[in-house]
Amino acid sequence: MVAIKMDLMGRLFAVVIFTVLTVIGLGFSLYLIINADSTYSYLLAFLYLALSMVAGLFNTFTAYSYYRSYFYDRYLAGITKGLRPPRRFPTVAVAVASYNEDPEVVERTIRKLRDLDYPEDRIRFYMLDDSTEKDKIRRVRGACSRLGYVYIHRKERKGFKAGALNNFMKGMKEEFLAVFDYDEYLTDPMFLRDLLPYFEDEKLSYIQTEKRYEKRSFFSDTVDLFDAFFFKFIQPSRALNNTAIFAGSCGLIRASSLRTIGGFPEYVIEDTFFSFESDMHGFKSLYVPKVYAYGKPISTFTELVKQQWRYNYGDTQFLGYFMKRSRNKGIRKRLSPLSNIDYMTHGFGLNYISVMLVLFTMVSILIVFSQFPVMHVTVQNMFSSAYIAFDLEILGIGALFISIIAPMLLTKMYFGSAKKGFMVFLLNFALAFIRAKAAIAAVFRKRYRVIWDRDNSIKSYRFAYALRNSVAEVAFSVFLIALGGIAVSVNNFFGGMWLLWYGILYVSTLFMFYRYK
């Protein structure tokens, strides 16, 4: 009971933090409007207000999700209470997709999946291998032969992972499809026995379980928190709206529903598109907050960059897809207001974190050099009505301070480490340009792939490798630090410190590539 109350208090505390962030952001905007004295300064003030309002909407929705997710366990318990053991065991296909991955990791995964507790005559295992490297093809095919997997290989990797799954579905006879990634190590063999009873509801299309990474290092454990926050708070809240995202693996799908939908939409993040189409076709979805398999940890910043590029490229594609599909009045009627918000915020999510950071930074530069008055008052009179402009000005500093301590406090409360929370804060700045580039590439329909390590010969030279892959961020940081120095030199101390701090944050990309290449 004490633990439950602490959890609820923690979520309410998160609501307070995000609410305070919203209020002080809008308060600083009010300061700018009060002190604007020209068309240019008014434009800046209202631009900052617009950004603050967008940030406020996201903060409000995040706070709402944190609080609402608390009630998901009760909702799921209500469903679980009515479950009965299956009258029969349906047939299940377990599919693992791979593309030029380490054969040893692949074999470790598919070997462990054979431990799934299910009647042998009702389950079949498949390897969907799109590899192009001959040695890896040979080794994976050999592992499949030894472990009783049906090996399926495509010569042309059309449609990414979705294409491999759709190609498999053409000949699939089983009633259910369990999808696992090549690097997910099964830890609970009851996966099928636990999840299949939920499918007594004929309208249930898929179930997603919690995805986490194996523990290895401080960096990889911090990266794991990206997923942990989503699966602990956002996913349960979405599931209450029937918009739980199928996360691509560690999930179970009803084959007939998948065929009705038309298979997996062939995009780089097919899972999000599939989730949306499932909802549009009137099916239900479910999220089970339990870990059944752990993925291989992301141990380098380069790996994280490639993952985040793919996510943000795909999310930007999805945003356009969602807006286009939502123009259909019939489809629009199928979505509740909360469902619409769920899909919009998912598409905007990483774009908001990255593009908004860059935009706030650019507007901050203009504000610092726009002749907004900086008031000089004593501690005794700073809170009098005559100095309300100063009171609003310091809200800008407060917003920056709370944006730092918020992830630290939340990770300390839920994951026992304030240090990892600060690392999450830094990573969002280190990835800001990368995510923004991915969004731009998606908007202009450029190829989704990007080769970060353009010259393998320099990879052994850590600093050269880091600098080559963070040129834009370093240049921007130098620019910000120089502007900060100029601001300080003309007695705009707060403005100078503001820009200097931003400069330090953006140069973290260089540090991450160097420290965790």
Image: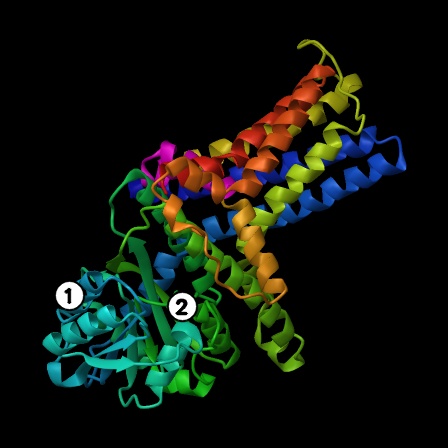
State which quarter of the image contains the C terminus.
Answer: top left
The residue carrying mark 1 is: 112
Residue 465 vs residue 193, the one in the foreground? 465
Instruction: Provide residue 182's location: percent of width, then percent of height.
Output: 27, 66
Residue 139 is one of the magenta-drawn residues: no
How is the structure coloured here?
Answer: rainbow
Which residue corresponds to the image point at 62% horizontal and 40% vertical from the top-left? 22
Image: magenta residue range? 410-430
Q: Report the magenta stretch's main SS.
A: helix
Secondary structure under tag 2 reads: loop
Coordinates of residue 380 in the picture (x, y in percent)? 68, 9
Location of residue 319 with respect to 217 vertically, above or below: below
Residue 338: quarter of image? bottom right
Up-down: is 472 above or below 373?
A: below
Eye-nearest disc, 2 or 1: 1
Q: Nearer the viewer, residue 335 or 499?
A: 499
Quarter of the image for residue 250 reads bottom left
Q: Quadrant of the N terminus?
A: top left
Q: Secondary structure at mark 1?
A: helix
Q: Image quadrant of residue 492? A: top right
Is residue 222 visible from the viewing direction of this image? yes
What residue did someone put label 2 on? 246
Circle nearer the N terminus (2, 1): 1
* 3D distance between C-alphas at marks 2 and 1: 22 Å
